[in-house]
Amino acid sequence: MLKISDGNSKLRKTSSKVKAHLAEHGSLNGFVPRPKAYRVVSFNIPAGGYETEGGKSFITCPGAGACLALCYARQGTFLFKGSKRVRIDNHQLLLTTYATQGLDGVVDILDKAVKSMSKTVAVVRLHDSGDFFKKWYVKAWMQVIERHPNILFYAYTKSFPMFKGMDLPDNFRVTYSFGGKFDSQIDGPNSRIFPTLDDRIAAGYVDGNDSDMPAILGERNIGLVYHGIKKPSAAQFKALD
């Protein structure tokens, strides 16, 4: 069965902020989750891509570009064996199911994973690591999201072309991320990586480091100040513009 993660420290902090926001405002910018729900969890696959023990390669972030060199989900704890295994297993099950059962089969296993979540879950992040890797995968998630109107789903993505001309469910909020192959096509809420806090503030982008509340609330410009282990060069940051 596909595994949905309880989330990292950032998502746990976001859960607390969702709970407080709902107590004060009664909704998440118009979205009202199921009663007593506030937690934020995530569904993940490997970031960028990976190679199996048999030597077969898979791409999981087809829209990635300059961002790959700085990707936080390809550093630190994401490299732990257990963390990698869960993400690879999720991706492999999706591929196998599509090959044997088609789109309906993928919708079924994603739907079962969502239904297995605690009733305290109000929000699901799609891809704390990884991205929408095929159009059929996007279609499957959109069908599942429509089946669960009292749960809010959100995602950052560089797979912008896969969403062109698609009607998105009201309970799905997507933020298009710069630093990929399709930057010139981005139109709508977006995010960027900045080298420093001052750079983010000067550009007029809201803080996306503290929590995922901006993406959940549908903020238009979300800035993420780089905080990875790798030390990027000025040229690498310039490539993200």
Image (cartoon, rainbow, N blue to C red):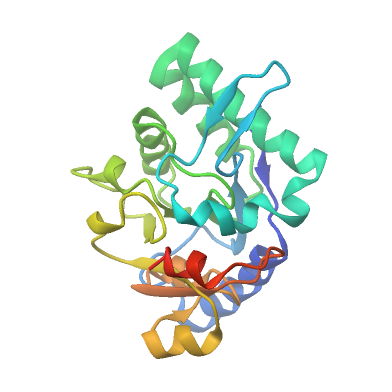
- Provide residue 116's location: percent of width, then percent of height: 64, 38
Measured along the vertical axis of the image, is residue 195 above or below residue 84?
Answer: below
- Which residue is located at x 28 percent, y 48 percent? 168
- Provide residue 69's location: percent of width, then percent of height: 57, 54
Q: Is residue 69 left or right of residue 157?
A: right
Instruction: Looking at the picture, tell me which residue is in the foreground, 54 or 78.
Output: 54
Quadrant hosting residue 148: top left
- Figure quadrant of the N terminus: top right
- Figure quadrant of the C terminus: bottom left
- Which residue is located at x 43 percent, y 64 percent? 32
Q: In the displayed image of the protein, which residue is found farthest to the right?
A: 81
Measured along the vertical axis of the image, is residue 125 above or below residue 100?
Answer: below
- Provide residue 92's location: percent of width, then percent of height: 60, 24
- Which residue is located at x 60 percent, y 59 percent? 40
Q: Is residue 78 left or right of residue 44?
A: right
Q: In the displayed image of the protein, which residue is found farthest to the left?
A: 165
Instruction: Looking at the picture, tell me which residue is in the foreground, 230 or 82.
Output: 230
Is any part of residue 129 visible from this angle?
yes
- Which residue is located at x 66 percent, y 32 percent? 88
- Provide residue 218's location: percent of width, then percent of height: 37, 69
Measured along the vertical axis of the image, is residue 130 above or below residue 137?
Answer: below
Instruction: Looking at the picture, tell me which residue is in the foreground, 174 or 78.
Output: 78
Is any part of residue 153 visible from this angle?
no
